[in-house]
Amino acid sequence: MYVTYATEEAVVVRDPLTGLESHPVRADSHHHVRWFYVLLLVVIAIAAIAGIVSTMAMGQPQVAFIIGLVAVAFFSRIGC
């Protein structure tokens, strides 16, 4: 038995046993969002590498280390 109630966005179904809501989803709607996230992460990674290389070329290894440290922290948070 499911409990159904309507919100402004959609009809939401709540499972009384687990208490979790299930929303209606269009088929393949999340596929394009996933590609957008992958593209965004690739752009961020390229920007981080370019920042590290350019600051090392300018002779500022401390700043390059900080950029690399922030990039590694960002991608480790995304991966875990």
Image (spheres, rainbow, N blue to C red):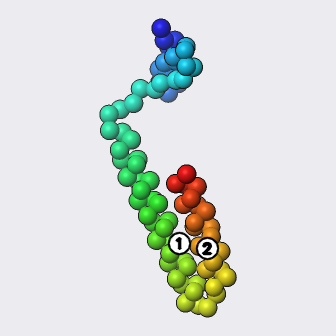
SS under mark 2: helix
Q: Report x, y in % for residue 29.
A: 36, 39
Q: Report x, y in % for residue 8.
A: 53, 24
Residue 27 relative to residue 60: left or right: left
Q: How many residues crowd mark 2 within 10 Å: few (<14), some (14–19), many (20+)?
A: some
SS under mark 1: helix
Q: Residue at x 54, y 60 (%)?
A: 75
**Hey, which quadrant is residue 38 in on the image?**
bottom left
Residue pointed to by mark 2? 67
Type of the residue with mark 2: Ile
Residue pointed to by mark 1? 48
Figure check: 12 above or below 42: above
Q: Say which label, 2 or 1, has the lower sequence index.
A: 1
Q: How many residues crowd mark 1 within 10 Å: few (<14), some (14–19), many (20+)?
A: some
Q: Residue at x 48, y 11 (%)?
A: 2
Figure check: 24 above or below 2: below
| Discs 2, 1 touching: Cβ within 8 Å | yes
**Hey, which quadrant is residue 62 in on the image?**
bottom right
- Residue 23 visible within the image: yes
- Name the residue nearer the viewer: 43 or 17: 17
Type of the residue with mark 1: Ala
Q: Residue at x 55, y 13 (%)?
A: 16
- Residue 6 visible within the image: no
Residue, far left: 27
Q: Residue at x 40, y 48 (%)?
A: 34
Q: Report x, y in % for residue 42.
A: 43, 64
